[in-house]
Image (cartoon, rainbow, N blue to C red):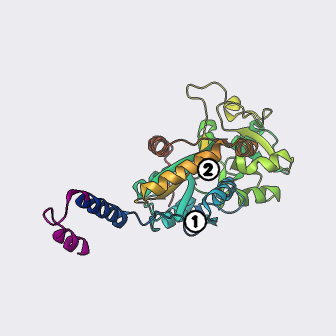
Amino acid sequence: MMTTLFTTRITSTSIAWPARRWFATVLATAALGLAAPAHAAWPEQPIRIVVPSGAGGSADAVARMVGERLGKVMGQPFVIENKGGGGGNIAAEVVSRAAPDGYTLLLTGNNHTINVSLFAKPPYKLEDFAPVIELTRGPSVFVAATNAPFTTLRELITKAKAAPGTIAYGGPGIGLPSHIAFELFQRETQINLIHVPYKGSGPSLADALGGQIPLVSSTLAAAMPNIKSGKLKALAVTSAERWPSLPDVPTAAEILGPSATPYSHLTWLGILAPKATPPGIVSRLNSEINKVLKDPEFKLKLEAMGTNPVGGTTTSFQKSLDEEFLSSRALIQSAKLRAD
């Protein structure tokens, strides 16, 4: 209203041209100020990264590493909030309903695109999120406890075929990448093991260390410390080729032998924001995280964990998400997987 009254009184007949040009500049500047986005000073408070698994897993570790770096350059702490369970659905639902103000993010993985097909009534849609950046890609690994009745993958296959449904294996949760990786392996080998879902790789690996479960399918990033220390034995990785940090561990494809479609399954981690999060905030996050992923020291830490940095644009991440959704849906339909 004030702008309208002001411009009504200042007319071309009442002031000279230089003055009119000066007033026009003032008004234009005022208009830009009124239209300036509310998030111009973002971030002004701590930012939480919701992780769909418990503390100690690879997703949690990567979230904390990224959050620590971002906090230093962006002037606000990044708080990690672990919300395991539901195969990632609990965390995703929390973020999908959060205010799109840049203060709540989701760090998730393959399960995000899997769950919308795996669950009859998933609590979110893929369209509920804006892609920020793909962080990492790496394989899963099948690890055996020291008291397991097998020491190689071949021995496991032999014992599982001799006594179907008697050997249990732990996974990070229904529909999570390492669960899908082992389900694919079971289909290829035609064996039948009992799946015991946990709330993340950390708890499942803890039970393997304690001898409560003989076998765990985990992300390599989460299992690497216990493999390196000799507390757990790596039976196989799920990458197409042997992983550089574990050159003596065979791939599952090597054990399965030649195939028209060689066995391979990689896990990815990425960051999403609630849809309608201002593009400026998404762009800032993408830019800062890309810098983190390109840092040589950070890359070495990821590689030591058993995963590789990815990075890239929001557009490339969205394309990857679309492709993951289509391949996941085809897998779930062919394997007739279903979670309640």
Badge 2 marks a residue whose secondary structure is helix
The residue lying toward the viewer, choosing from 243 and 178, is 243
Pointer 1 local density, CA inside 10 Å: few below 14, some 14–19, many at least 20: many
Question: At 45% from the left edge and 55% from the top edge, which residue is drawn?
Answer: 280
- Labels 1, 2: front one: 1
Q: CA distance from mark 1 to mark 2?
A: 30 Å
Could you tell me if the residues under marks 1 and 2 are in contact, i.e. CB atoms within 8 Å? no
Badge 1 marks a residue whose secondary structure is strand
On residue 179, the disc is 2
Task: List x then y, in percent, for residue 188.
Answer: 60, 36
Where does the magenta region start and end? 1-18
Task: List x then y, in percent, for residue 10.
Answer: 19, 68
Question: At 56% from the left edge and 59% from the top edge, which residue is drawn?
Answer: 87
On residue 245, the disc is none
Task: List x then y, in percent, for residue 303.
Answer: 72, 41
Left or right, 324 with reference to 139: left
Residue bearing the label numbered 1: 47
Q: Earlier in the sequence, mark 1 or mark 2?
A: 1
Q: Quadrant of residue 295?
A: top right
The residue lying toward the viewer, choosing from 291 and 221, is 291
Magenta residue check for 12: yes
Task: List x then y, in percent, for residue 291.
Answer: 61, 46
